[in-house]
Amino acid sequence: MINRFTCLCLAAGLLILIVSSSCSSAPKKPNAVYTERNMASSQLDLANAAANHGRYEDALMILEDARRLAVSVDDPPLLIRTSIAYGYLLFALGRQNEAFGHWEAAVAEAESSGDRELAALARIYTARGRIMLIGNSGTVNNAEAIRDEVNGLISVFRSDMQAQAAGYLVLGMAEKELERYAEAERAVRRALDFYEKNLYLEDAAYGWFFLASVFSVNSRYDDALSALHTAIDFDRRAENGFGLASSWQAIGEVYRKKSAIAPNTGVVSGAGADRNNAVRAFLRAAEIYRAIGLDEAAQNAEAKAAAIN
């Protein structure tokens, strides 16, 4: 016969089994929550994608949300990366002083948090801005000093190969400015090795686009055209209309240079065909620009075509 004591013991044993079973199957609590950080990172990726497609104003709006989330969780890496992205976008929009301010803030935040690699990355973007100002506004810069600085910064990266590739691209820009074209090509190809192997399609397209500019200033026009068509192949795979239009416009510029009278000779080689190719390339660029809503860029490309005719 089962008495009250036996029933209570059985009930207690059942309770222990239930509690024990419940505890063993319950998920462990995470040691950190990443919901807001993941959202900020996703928004940052979207902003970068919009920027790669030439939609700088849209990218800026998306980035503002990423920055708000980064600030709300006080996450140093996200604060640094959003500051770097702000600098890139503002520079592209012609707001250079603000851009350099954000890059300086990124460096300060990285140094404060002890992140040497992100500090180096912010400095690489700063160096890129300084190099681009040499050609864009005639600002006096020491390209050799910038090249040496970037060389040192690249060595900081141990595992971030994407950051290394960004450094090699800026190194190529500095070498081009110094008219060391073989060295510029070598640096850019090191960046391209990473971009192509890891299928960074838009970055690979830009690498080939820039390499074409190295060939063009060195009067290697056929190599420049080949590089631009490779850029177009990558941008087609990425469905990047802005990159496609930019490359077609650059093709027009290369053909226009080819059609010019050779210095000190008065000889025009294949000028008629080159001019026709230039016109077609400019008009194709205009068509793509208009299709992606960049009417001012389209008008500029059409004006270049009309000037040849």
Image (cartoon, rainbow, N blue to C red):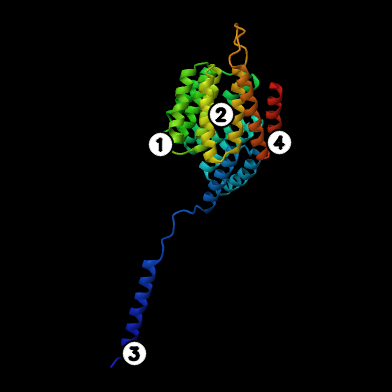
Labels 4 & 3 near each other (Cβ < 8 A)? no
- Rendering quarter of residue 245: top right
Amino acid type of the residue that numbered disc 3 sits on in the rendered structure? Arg
Residue in view at x 49 percent, y 31 percent: 166
Q: Quick one: label 2 or label 4, which is nearer the N terminus?
A: 2
Which quarter of the image is occupied by the N terminus? bottom left
Closer to the camera in the image, 75 or 215: 215
Instruction: Give the Cα separation between the discs numbered 1 and 2.
Output: 21 Å
Identify the residue position indicated by label 2 in the image.
126
Decide: few, some or many residues near mark 3? Use Cα within 10 Å; few <14, some 14-19, many ≥20: few
Amino acid type of the residue that numbered disc 4 sits on in the rendered structure? Asp
Instruction: Give the Cα separation between the discs numbered 3 and 1.
Output: 68 Å
Labels 1 & 2 near each other (Cβ < 8 A)? no
Closer to the camera in the image, 221 or 154: 221
Amino acid type of the residue that numbered disc 2 sits on in the rendered structure? Thr
Image: 60 above or below 281: below
- Return the residue found at the far left: 1
Identify the residue position indicated by label 3 in the image.
4
Q: Quick one: label 4 or label 3, which is nearer the N terminus?
A: 3
Give how far across and how far down residue 138 sits, in percent: 64, 18
Q: Quick one: label 1 or label 2, which is nearer the N terminus?
A: 2
Instruction: Give the Cα separation between the discs numbered 3 and 2.
Output: 81 Å
Query: Which label number is shown at residue 295?
Result: 4
Closer to the camera in the image, 3 or 19: 19
Judged by depth in the image, the label closer to the viewer, 3 or 1, is: 1
- Rendering quarter of residue 197: top left
